[in-house]
Image: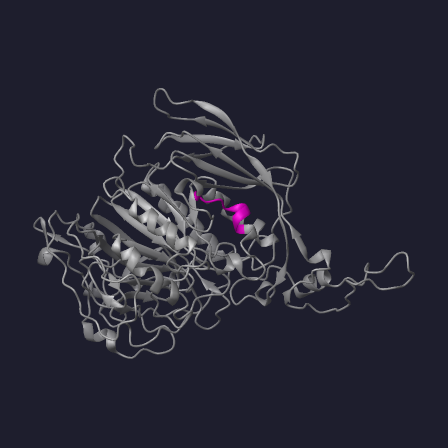
């Protein structure tokens, strides 16, 4: 189970969003070329990687040629895998954000949408002179909502999508590959899996959600790539907790999203679950299911929308926030069987992701997932879930270990990572008072890095990468005025690059072997009062301390586990914080409050 010994302040970041600077322009999406494009990798069953790519023509072969660069003796050195091809079409929806997004530049103009919707140039019956056809529509203005079913111009048809599985791969080995007979080679390293000869530790999950296609989305994509590269070959995957392209019913945005993600997704497996932007606005999972195959069959699921896989030392479970979750439903039935079969000796860590968060103190999307929480929270807790990943709310929040709204060392830590950078922008305000279970929250953009250090400890950090301008929320700021002041002290570096990545929240997560009592009931009811359970004493060594140079840079708004004299402070972990519990009770305004270090002297580092 997961009692986590994190006893710290509940903090709202007092970071002041600065004035804006111009957003970087999205490159115009290119037409589907005759060459393969949109390459992306995910994991299939054990020892499998799935390669997906797109072509304009159906005559291109669905095949991947591969060569192992450093395989162990006895492993196949090269080969060609053959897959299958498909395409889909759907009636497009035209959202207002398509032409006037709150953040970033428009995908298309109002005029371009109007041209698609106006059929007056052709909708006549050729055999009855001058008689208008049933699909005749003449309007010079764009109209928003679902397109007309009888207007072929409002129908999107995808490129040919090729899906090929590479099987019997060697964990930790690096492979070069080409797709569809193309001569451009890419490479990836097969992530470590339980049973591999090498140690599974350390292993990193690079985390995000709600990415979209703005300049900050692209910056975060490269930051995720940097995390994966820094983790070492075969020791990282990227995990996206829903809301990928923000196509919102406009099909070409799925293609531009996959092109934009290729520098990351063609080299590092990206594991996803679906969000509301994958099924709303006429999407209905069509693009998601065609483009992003998940390992559901190998995990005994009947749907691409919920699945699981062992990844490094982690059993990762993906759930769907937009399918039935009650006891007896397909998803619940599968989840119960999947969790019961987890071998915590093979995969000591259990991580679950779904799109809509169960715990959220932001004013956006309040309690949207409450039925799912009431249906499934006890089930996750009963099987010792360690961490729950979500998105949906366009801000960042980390919780204390929590169960049914109460602090509980046997509950999971929830990480809400809907701050990937999509065109809807960030959400404010935060609700007050800040709940006891809310450890840290901030309305800006960033990514998470969850590194599993050993079978009992994981190091976690959230890095702010950009923010919206406080005066013009249609702009994004990447430069030094968006940096954390924690890095802006005498003798410390300024982060003034166009790809800022500043650690703003850090924590040690600790699993305990002491058993937690299983819940007495199968379905929760909300609690009006909480009794905080004490954490059992640890029976194993504490985590390694953070590097001294990092520990000195974190103040209010950061939580760092510190080992002292070979034993954890207080028999568990101590938090390096720079404020009292009373500070979190101060009423905050409707905008981001002052920076956490703005009230301290420069020499107080």
The x and y percentages for residue 123 are: 81, 60
Quadrant of image for the C terminus: bottom left
- Residue 279: say if magenta: no
- How is colour applied across the structure in the image? one colour
Q: Residue furthest top?
A: 74
251 vs 468, left or right, is right
Is residue 400 among what the camera can see? Answer: no
Q: Quadrant of residue 92?
A: bottom right
The x and y percentages for residue 138 are: 78, 67
Q: Quadrant of residue 44?
A: top left
Q: Residue furthest front?
A: 328
The x and y percentages for residue 163 are: 53, 38
In the figure, 178 relative to 30: above or below? above
Q: Quadrant of residue 237?
A: top left
433 vs 71, left or right, is left
User: Which residue is more in the foreground, 536 or 181?
Assistant: 536
Is residue 70 among what the camera can see? Answer: yes
User: Which residue is more in the foreground, 387 or 17?
Assistant: 387
Q: Residue furthest left?
A: 565
In the figure, 186 relative to 115: above or below? above
- Residue 292: say if magenta: yes
The x and y percentages for residue 398 are: 30, 62
> At 71% from the left edge and 69% from the top edge, which residue is drawn?
141
> At 12% from the left edge and 47% from the top edge, which residue is drawn?
540
In the figure, 422 relative to 300: above or below? below
User: Which residue is more in the foreground, 271 or 485?
Assistant: 271
Q: Which residues are magenta?
A: 288-296
In the figure, 194 relative to 560: above or below? above
């Amino acid at each position: 189970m997961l009692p986590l010994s994190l006893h710290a302040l509940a903090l709202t970041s007092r970071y002041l969003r600065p004035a804006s600077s111009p957003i970087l322009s999205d490159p115009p999406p290119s037409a589907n070329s005759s060459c393969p494009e949109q390459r992306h990798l995910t994991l299939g069953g054990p020892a499998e990687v799935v390669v997906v790519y797109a072509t304009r023509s159906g005559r291109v072969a669905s095949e991947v040629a591969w060569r192992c660069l450093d395989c162990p003796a006895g492993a196949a050195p090269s080969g060609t895998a053959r897959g299958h091809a498909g395409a889909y079409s759907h009636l497009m929806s035209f959202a207002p954000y398509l032409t006037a997004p709150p953040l970033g530049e428009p995908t298309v103009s109002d005029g371009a949408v109007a041209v698609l919707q106006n059929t007056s140039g052709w909708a006549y019956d050729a055999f009855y002179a001058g008689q208008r056809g049933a699909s005749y529509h003449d309007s010079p203005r764009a109209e928003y909502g679902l397109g007309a079913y009888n207007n072929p111009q409002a129908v999107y048809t995808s490129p040919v999508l090729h899906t090929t599985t590479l099987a019997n791969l060697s964990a930790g080995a690096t492979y070069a590959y080409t797709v569809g007979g193309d001569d451009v080679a890419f490479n990836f390293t097969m992530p470590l899996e339980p049973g591999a000869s090498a140690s599974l530790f350390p292993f990193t999950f690079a985390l995000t959600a709600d990415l979209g296609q703005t300049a900050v989305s692209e910056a975060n994509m490269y930051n995720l790539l940097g995390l994966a590269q820094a983790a070492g070959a075969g020791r990282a995957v990227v995990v996206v907790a829903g809301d990928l392209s923000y196509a919102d019913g406009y099909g070409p945005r799925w293609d531009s999203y996959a092109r934009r993600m290729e520098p990351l997704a063609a080299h590092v497996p990206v594991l996803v679950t679906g969000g509301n932007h994958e099924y709303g606005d006429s999407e209905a999972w069509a693009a998601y299911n065609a483009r992003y195959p998940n390992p559901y069959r190998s995990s005994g699921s009947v749907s691409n929308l919920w699945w699981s896989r062992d990844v490094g030392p982690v059993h990762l479970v993906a759930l769907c926030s937009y399918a039935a979750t009650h006891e007896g439903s397909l998803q619940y039935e599968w989840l119960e069987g999947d969790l019961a079969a987890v071998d915590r000796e093979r995969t000591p860590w259990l991580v679950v992701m779904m799109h809509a968060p169960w715990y959220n103190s932001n004013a956006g999307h309040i309690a949207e997932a409450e039925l799912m929480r009431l249906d499934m929270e006890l089930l996750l807790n009963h099987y010792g879930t360690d961490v729950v990943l979500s998105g949906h709310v366009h801000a960042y929040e980390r919780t204390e270990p929590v169960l049914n709204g109460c602090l509980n060392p046997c509950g999971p830590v929830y990480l809400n990572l809907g701050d990937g950078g999509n065109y809807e922008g960030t959400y404010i305000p935060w609700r007050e008072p800040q709940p006891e279970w809310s450890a840290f929250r901030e309305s800006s953009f960033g990514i998470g890095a969850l590194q599993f250090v050993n079978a009992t400890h994981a190091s976690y950090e959230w890095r702010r990468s950009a923010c919206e301008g406080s005066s013009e929320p249609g702009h994004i700021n990447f430069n030094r005025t968006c940096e954390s002041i924690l890095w802006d002290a005498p003798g410390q570096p300024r982060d003034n690059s166009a790809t800022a990545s500043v650690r703003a929240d850090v924590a040690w997560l600790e699993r305990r072997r002491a058993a937690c009592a299983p819940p007495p009931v199968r379905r929760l009811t909300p609690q009006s009062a909480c009794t905080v359970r004490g954490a059992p004493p640890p029976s194993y060594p504490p985590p390694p301390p953070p590097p001294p140079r990092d520990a000195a840079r974190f103040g209010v708004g950061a939580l760092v586990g510190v080992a002292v004299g070979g034993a954890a402070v207080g028999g568990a972990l101590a938090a390096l914080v720079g404020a009292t519990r009373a500070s979190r009770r101060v009423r905050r305004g409707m905008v981001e409050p002052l920076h956490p270090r703005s009230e301290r002297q420069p020499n107080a580092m």
